[in-house]
Structures are given as structure tokens and as C-alpha cells.
Image: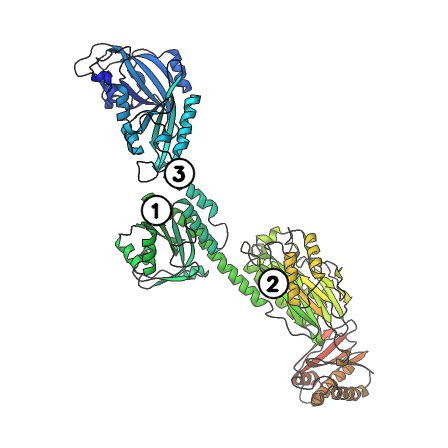
Amino acid sequence: MTGEAARGVPPGGTVQGRVPEDLAVVVDARGVITVWSDGARRLLGYEPDEVVGRAAARLLAAGLPGSTRRHVADGQHWASEVALRHRDGDRVVVRLQGTPLLDADRGRLWLVTGTALAHTERRAGHGSLPLWDLTLAQLPVPVAVYDREARLVAANEAMTQVMGRSEEEMKGLTLWEIEPSPPFDEYDRLQREVLRTGEMIFHEEHGKAPGETRPHAWSMFMSPLKDETGAVQGMCATVFDTTEQYWARRRLAVLNDAGLRIGTTLDVTRTAEELAEVAVSGFADFVTVDLLESVALGDEPEPVPLDAPVTVRRTAQRSVLEGCPESVVASGDATLYRVGTLPVRTLVAGRGSRHRPGDRGLREWVQSSPARADSVARHVIHSVMMVPLRARGVTLGLVHFLRHRTPESFSEDDLLLAEEIVARAAVSVDNARRYTRERRTALALQRSLLPDRPPDLAAMRVAYRYLPAGSGADIGGDWFDVIPLSGTRVALVVGDVVGHGIHASATMGRLRTAVRTLADVDLAPDELLTQLDDLVIRIDREEGPEARGREAETSGQVGATCLYAVYDPVSRRCTMARAGHPPPALVTPDGAVRFLDLPAGPPLGLGGLPFEAVEVQLEENSLLALYTDGLVKAADDDMDVGLTLLREALGHPAEALEETCEQVLRTVLTGRPADDIVLMLARTAALDAGKVRTWQLPPEPTAVARARRMAGEQLAVWGLAEAAFTTELIVSELVTNALRYGGTPIELRLIRDSALICEVSDGSSTAPHLRRARVFDEGGRGLLLVAQLSGRWGSRQTATGKTIWAEQPLLGQGDGTGG
């Protein structure tokens, strides 16, 4: 009550030209009364329940002036004399002022205050009190009035509670003088801007007020107070506590953040880390993600037993404190949830729960580990949530959310938020787990189908690298092989099946097996690719486009690509053919690098198109580089750039092939490969001329005895006299077979390597075969005898006919130096 009222000034009267303020009303944008002060009740006689929620226009005894209606429509401050209707029907003239405000949803509000100028006599008991005092006292939101120098004139009780000071303590001071600390310097600046510009300012802040123990979200309306001339006489600050709305927006932001940041990769650990990062940046102070041991390994999770301990692995953890000092388990370590403990019960229940340190279950869990109890006490952890990580009805692990820096305990809304983001993360974790399992299976399948280590060869030294694509892509169908052939020759194979995943790996295995089978037949490279092409066509027909996968349909390629090369260390000739595969690189002993100009040939699976073989003479100590396109396309998917980098890397090869492989990969790979990569390096050697002996035989029966004699003499020179008897028998049978069933020219060749190789060539292309001789047959037992005397035998087609060969192991026989 103001001083005039205290001195008994009658309602509507004046003291030295002043009148008491009687009315304060809040009206929303629809013109509906939302707040009705006690002064308004005294002045107009209406109880709050008679007017709140009804149109303010019902109180008008006459229409508003036109200028006032325009100011209301424009949302501007207005002042006008208005005739109002008393509850008893009397006419009351009031000087009203309308101050525009915004509610928490940015909707328009009007704070209407007024002073009675003239009204009829009212019945006893309907007196009025000074209005502004009542407004400040009655409004349930903090309100303060400042003069033109931004000094406090008045504050209601709600404001004094927020500020933690009485009105008398603050009166006459600026905000910066009342509270000389941030953010009150910013508030003081904003208030002076309102006084200077005459424009209302809306400001939001989250923090702890001087009179509060916990942070709140505040929405502040700083409105100018103008007189009838429009001059700014002061300002009003109205503050709304929007903490609930703040946390609601915060939770929505966390959900949106979770949708954007969780599940960006198909990696179980990274997905768990993303979950922890989102939760800590959103609403928790410390988060741990424990996955069941089987899930962390990418296996199928087993049901969580209630009567047995549960082993989990700390997959991720994140804290608002650097280094996660709250943790008692390091990331990557396994830990045990003991029988009957709160984590096990939560996993079995499949529902999230909130706990405080005083809760019995949480207290038992904390005290079961001295380190955990010490951490909870040291960091004053006061609120905990445990939420199971579940996807597709399967439990994958448990997520712990803890608070120690945030004063508020977790609410029920926080638990709902935690369950929502954990549910989203669980799907991503399960997808990553399934992908990891399939990729591991495909990788194991592919590695089982690829060479384990380079074979020990006399013809060359070989080193290779196989790099599966990174975690962002399925494993592909790249393969390679090193196949020893007869006569110390060796075949090199590099191929790439179109598509990815287990299907591509399985197809690769079929093709690799087919290549080995065809290589054993000793087909020429172009003929081998023709046979392989037919196989790919059959596979496509058998399985159909659905099994080949979407990649094969959209890649522009069909089936697979392949490069097949055969090197003969005796002649130093290398015969090659390719089916849509990148050309091999050749590094000569002087360091020159060139890509061999081989006919490209069509990819395997097109059918009906020929392949062409090319023979290249190689110097001893030459280096061949065979690779898949994943290597040269790794540089921005530009093969020309990749080939240039490969040429540069091979220009200065290291002495060791393994080092050269690493050198090539470091140079060519500028980032994570998007496709599988195979690199195979082969350094050629020439077989010592002293280890090879060749004879031309005449087409006559005496050639058999001559061949036996020459073979025995050569074995004596090589120090292999102990093998002479067996070798002479093999030579006799093979030469006899050539004389009977073959044609000229006939040639005998002995090769002394890790095995003793006997080869007889003739001009007939008819392939030999074993047959069962009858009791009285005079022939037909020769090849059977050869097969039993030798370690292995076979035949191959040549340009002029065929060659039949037989090998005998030479373990511990002679040193090969010869006499």
C-alpha cells in the first residue's frame, strides 16, 4: 500500500495531483484475461473466477480509442483513458497503460496497469488499494522496476527471493552494483540498451541466481516504461523460470544429436564410444558402456543368466572430467557382474532404472568393490541410471549413467531419454556386431583360400600383400596364387571377383580351385582363361542375378578379372594373358620400370571373345609386379594417378621383396582403401645351365638304350648314382612310349633341382593315360610303372606336341655340384 492510501485518500481521489494506482491485469493475445489482481477486484468488484479466462472486452463500458486499438494491433506500448464497467453496473474511468510482453512460447502478452480517475460511489467494502504495490506483491513471477539510470525502484517478493536480497538492500542500485559478477554485467548492459532505444529485449540464460541453490533457465523480458509523450521513464524486468522447457529442449537436442552421431560406422567399439559421447555432452557426467563378452567379440549373445556371473567388457566410457578418473575399469578390460547384483538384475529385467547412493541395491553394488566405493565417495556421485542395451529382443550389454557435477538428480524424463538413445544405439551396435561377424567369416574364408606363405621355388622369389577393405566396406573377392608347375616352371595368378561379402569370397574360392586344376593340366595362359571364362558363365547361370548381388549389377563389369602368367627359369621366358585385369609392371635389373603391353582381353563371364597370350623374355633378377585394381584406384579413384605412383614406387626397389611391398603400399596408398588390395612381387631367377641336360633322340628302337646310358652317365656327374636304376627305368618307359605312340621330334631332358625331373617330348598331341593291362598283354604297363616309381608325373601340351614328365624326390641325395 502506498503512502497516499495509508493516509486515507479515498478511491478516485487525488493528493497534490496524483492518484493511487488500482488495477493490474494480464491479457493474452486473444484478449482473454489470464491474471486478475486484488486491486482490480477492489476497483471493479469482480472475483477472479468471474473474469479469468474471459474476454477483457466484456469489461469495457465504451469502445477503445482508435489510437489505442492501433497500438494494440501493432504490439506497441499504449496509454489511454478507458471507461470500464463495475460489477454493479457503475461506470469507472481509468487511466490505463498497456505493456507488451512475450510468454515462454514467444506469444504476445499484455500487462495492463491503471489508475482510477472517476467512478461512482460504491458500497462499503469495495475500496481499492494502490495498484503497483499489489502488482509487485501478487505476480507469481519475479518483477523489478528500474528508473532512467537503471537503478532499482521496486521489486516484488519473487524477485527478492531470486536475488537473495531484500528490496531495501537493492533499492537505488544498478544490477552490476547489486551483483558485480557475470552474467549480471550483461544484464546491466541490456537494461541500459532498453533505456536508450526504448525497445523491449528478450533474453534467455541458464545459470544459478544469487538466491538459488541450483541452476535454472530464465526467460527475461526487459520492457521500457514510457509516459504519455512516449518518453522512456524507466524499465520493467519480468523473469520467467523456464527450467522445465529448457530441459525438454535439451532432451530433444540430445535425441537429435544421437540420431546424427550414433551409428556412423559399422564398428562395435566406435558405436559404443559415440553413445557415451552423446550422453556426456547431453545430460550425464560420466557414462560407461559394458558389452557382453560375446558381443564385444562379434559373436551371438547368449541369454543373461540370473544364477551365474556375467562377464562384460568395458567397451567405452566418457566423462566431463579429463581421463575418466571415476572409472575403476579401463576401456577394453573385462569385468564380472556377480550373481544377484544390481547390474545382473537390470540385465535380466530388460528395463532401465534410477538409483541414489542410499538405495539398497546400489549401495550393495558400490560396496562390493573398494575401488568403486572410493570413486563414488571421492567424486560425490549422487545419481545413477542403469539401462540395458537391447536390440531385436536380445540383450547386448549395460550402460551406466552417473551424475556428480550436475546438481539435479536424474528425473523420470532423463530415464526415458536414456532408454531412447540406448535403444537407438543398440540397433547400431547389433548391426555392427552382425557385420563384424559376417566380415570375419568372409575374411577367414578368403584367407583360408589364399596362400598361407610363399612357396620355396627355384625359379623365383615371391612376396605378396593382401589388404582387405576398411571397416566401411564388405570384404571383396580379390585372390592370388603361386602354383609350381612341372619342369621347375611357376604360374602366377591374380584375380578379382566382382562384388563383396561372403558370396564374392565363395566365388573367388571356386575360381582359384579351378585355376589350380587347369594349371595342373598345364594349359597355356590363353587356353586357361578360356576355360575359366566358361566356368564363370556357368556360375552366373546357376545362381542368377540375385545371388551375384547388387554390386555386380551396377558395376559395369561381369564376373571377374584375372591375370595368368607362367615363367620358365630354364628358358627365362614368361607367357602371360589377362582377362580385363590391369597390366603387370616389369622392373629390369637396371631399374627401368614399364607396364607390359598385353592385350586386355574381356572380363571373365562375357563369353565368346578370345584371349591372347604374349611371351616375354626376362633377364635374370627381373621384378614382376602383379596387383588388383584396388591398389591403383586408391588414389582418388583415378587409375592413371595410381599407375604413376606405382611406377615411382617400383623405380627404386629394396633388396628384400618384403620391404619393397611395404614401400609400394606406403607410396601408392594415400588413404583408407575402398576396395580389397592384392600386390604380388616376383623376382625371377635362371636355372643353372649345369643343372639341365637335353638330348635329341632318333625315332628308332636303339634310342631307348642310348637314352638309358646317357641318363645314367649324367646322374653320375651330378652325384646321384643311387637314383640311376630308378631313373633309367623311367627313361626307358617314357622313351619307349614316345617311339610307339608319339611322333618326331623326340627329346629327353633331365633337370636337377629340389627333385630330379625326367621329361620326354614328342610331336604327338595325344594325351597319355593309364590303363589296366590284361594278363597276356605285351604292353600297356609303362605309365603304370612310371607312376609307381616317381613321386608325381603328368603331361603337358606344347607348341609342337606334348611332354610327359616324372619327378623323383632327392632328399639327401648328392649335392648337385657334379664330380
List x then y, in percent, for residue 258.
44, 46
Label 3 to label 1, Cα distance in Å?
15 Å
Q: Position of residue 500 (x, y in %)?
A: 57, 57
Q: Secondary structure at mark 2?
A: strand
Mark 1 sits on what residue?
415
Disc 2 to disc 3: CB gap under 8 Å: no
Point 36% across, 47% down: residue = 405
Residue 337 in view: yes
Amino acid residing under circle 1: Leu
CB within 8 Å, label 3 to label 1: no
Classify residue 575 as left or right of residue 177.
right
| Count of numbered tags | 3
Q: Give the label on residue 466, or none.
A: 2
Would residue 196 be found to the left or right of residue 556 on screen?
Answer: left
- Vertical position of residue 625 compared to residue 767: above or below: above
Which residue is rendered at x = 62% and y = 64% of the image? 465
Q: Amino acid at mark 3?
A: Arg
Image quarter of residue 573: bottom right
**Residues under labels 2 and 3: Cα distance?**
50 Å
The residue carrying pointer 3 sits among few (fewer than 14), some (14 to 19) or many (20 or more) residues within 10 Å by Cα, namely few
Callout 1 secondary element? helix
Query: Counting residues from the N terminus, which is met first, the one under dot 2 or under dot 1?
Result: 1
Please give the name of the residue rendered at 33% of the width and 53% of the height, measured from the top-left corner: 378
Tell me the kind of residue under disc 2.
Tyr
Q: Earlier in the sequence, mark 3 or mark 1?
A: 3
717 and 407: which one is in front? 407
Position of 9 relative to 298 (above/below): above
Along the line of sight, the residue nearer the viewer: 582 or 341: 341
Residue that numbered label 3 is attached to: 249
- Colouring of the image: rainbow
- 16, above or below 27, in the image: above
Asked if the residue under mark 1 is in contact with the one under mark 2, i.e. CB atoms within 8 Å, the reply is: no
